[in-house]
Amino acid sequence: MNFPDDLTPGAICLYGGNGGGEGFAAKLIEIREDDPDTDHVALYIGGGKVFTAFPRGGVNVYDFSPTGLVHVRQPLGTVNLAKLLAWIPTVQGAPYGWIDIEADAGKKEPPQPFVPDAATIHVTGAHCSHTVAMGCEVLEVPQFEPAFDKRLVEPYHFKMSVASKRVWDVSQMATNLTPASPDLSPRAEGEQIQHTP
């Protein structure tokens, strides 16, 4: 797999070993998860870009990086990329969800509700797992059952989702991890991308 050329919008990128670049936040996530394999998650949106949250930049669009990448999962079904791209500007710049991370590390219930609502996110903030889970909901490919309390979502939960399939993992490291030129071709308004299982 060549990154990011072979990624399609909607791909869920899981990072480990602090490869997501979150430093202290990644360590707190590892304490909560008891899973050293994953400490960050990002949603690939095309053009060499991902949607996620970092402590320094909050909820935002960032350049894709293969550093620390351990798993790539593809949602099953059709993703509504146009809807996601229209929604992202409403939440861009929201703060990082430190309150949730601290609650997670202390194994307490997060104080914020799971609502993909811009006004709520700008007040409470969101960490990477919330950001990607909300992005998947907006893409119309939710990754978790309705009964799952999404306030408790962590990066490793995405590895277990039955609504996506693994398309690459770190055991395939012989593949090219050199970032390629991003695809900057325009997409038609309302374009949907079909992913097959």
Image (cartoon, rainbow, N blue to C red):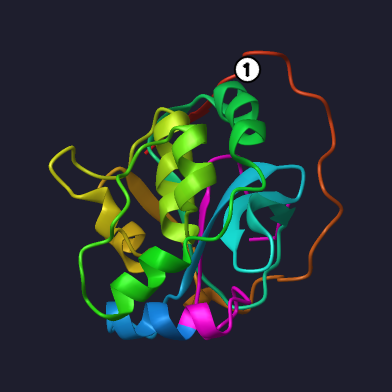
Left or right placement of residue 20 versus residue 49 in this view: left
Q: Residue at x 29, y 79 (%)?
A: 32
Looking at the image, the residue that sits furthest to the front is 123
Q: In the picture shown, does residue 56 fall above or below 106?
A: above
Q: Residue at x 45, y 51 (%)?
A: 124
Image quadrant occupied by the C terminus: top left
Residue 21 is one of the magenta-drawn residues: yes
Name the spot of residue 51 as percent of width and height, x first: 61, 49
Task: Compare residues 40 and 105 and report the one nearer the observer.
Answer: 105
Residue 193 is one of the magenta-drawn residues: no
Q: In the picture shown, does residue 178 fall above or below 146?
A: below
The region drawn magenta spans 1-26
Task: Compare residues 17 and 110 and report the one nearer the observer.
Answer: 110
The residue carrying mark 1 is 191
Name the spot of residue 21 as percent of width and height, x first: 63, 77
Left or right placement of residue 36 versus residue 72 in this view: left
Three-letter amino acid code of the residue under disc 1:
Glu
The quarter of the picture where residue 102 lies is bottom left
Q: Residue at x 37, y 50 (%)?
A: 165
